[in-house]
Amino acid sequence: MPTSTVIIKGRTERREFAEAYRQACDAFAQLGLAPQLNPSSAQIADFFLFFQSYPYEFLPSELTQLRRDNPLAPFFFVLGACCEGMQRTASPPDSPFYVYAHAWSTQDAEQIRLFLTDQRSLFSLPLTAGADEVALCRITCGIACDAPKRVGDAANCLILTHFGPFGNDAAMNLLLADEHRHLGYEPVFSGEMPPDAFSGIILADADNSPAEKILDSIQRLRCRLADNDFTVYIDSPRIDEKSAYVQAGATRVLAKMR
C-alpha cells in the first residue's frame, strides 16, 4: 500500500463538487489513505487536490508558497461553474492539471490512483506541460486504463477524424497516431464511419459536433461493429453527455480539456 500524503483544499460541500469529491475519496480509501481536508498547519504533501469555486479563491501568493514547499507534488484543480472562462481571461489555474466539475469522470479518479501507486498517469507529466501534451496524455492514459491489450505483431487502430460528423482536430489526431504507433498499433485514418468488418480499436474525434449528431453516429457505428473497443474524445463534455454517449454504445468518453 502507498504511504503518500494527500491534502484536499476547498469547499468540498458544494453540490457541484459532490460527485468528484466522492469518487476521489473512494480512490484514496481504496489505497488506505486518509486525506487532510483544509489543514491549518504546515502543508507538506505528495498530492494536492483543489476544489475551486471561483477565480482566485486560492491566492497566487498561497499557491506560490505551496509550490515552493512541495516542488514535486502535482496540483490537481477541480473547477466550479464560476471558473468557466478562466482560460479566456488569462487567469488559468496554477497547474496544467485541471478539470471542470461538470466534466469529471471515473478516469480522473483513476489517474489519481495510478499516480499514487507509482504508475504512469496524467500527473507523470512535468509542470511545464502544454495543453496539447496534457490533452494527449488524458486520452492515451484514459484508454490504457481499461482498453484491451494489443494482440499479435500488429493490431489495428482506426482514428475517425470527422465523427459526428465534425471534429478533425488534425494536430491531436496526428499525435494520437504517433503515440499508438509507439505502443505497437498500426494507426489508420478514416472519415465519419469505419469500414465494415473492421477489427481493432477505434478512436473518434467528435469535437464541435452537436450532441444529437454524436449520439446518432455512436448508435450507427455500434449497429455496424458491435464488439470493438471504441473511444470518443471531445474537448469538454458534460457529465450527462458522457453518460448518454456510453449508453448509446461508446466504450468510454474522454475529455481533452484544452
Image: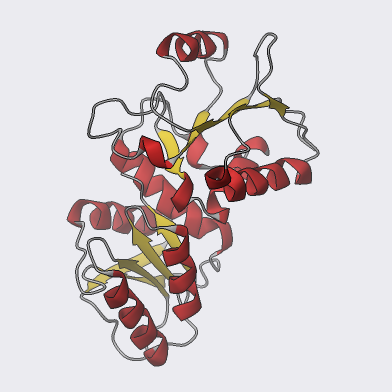
Horizontal and vertical percent for residue 176? 32, 56
Q: Position of residue 206 (x, y in %)?
A: 28, 66
Residue 36, located in which quarter of the rendered image? top right
Q: Quadrant of the N terminus?
A: top right
Q: Is residue 215 above or below residue 26?
A: below
In-image side of 246 versus 160 (left or right): right
Q: How is the image coloured?
A: secondary structure
From the viewer's side, name the closer residue of 108 and 88.
88
Q: Is residue 9 above or below residue 16?
A: above
Q: Nearer the viewer, residue 238 or 204?
A: 238
Quadrant housing the C terminus: top left
What residue do we see at 33% from left, 29% from top?
92
Name which residue lies at 45% across and 51% down. 102
Q: Residue at x 63, y 38 (%)?
A: 13
Q: Is residue 25 visible?
A: yes
Q: Left or right? Give the position of 7 relative to 87.
A: right
Along the horizontal axis of the image, is 113 left or right of 128? right
User: Residue 131 falls in which quadrant of the image?
Assistant: top left
- In the displayed structure, 126 sits above or below 228; it is above
Where's residue 114, x and y in %? 62, 43
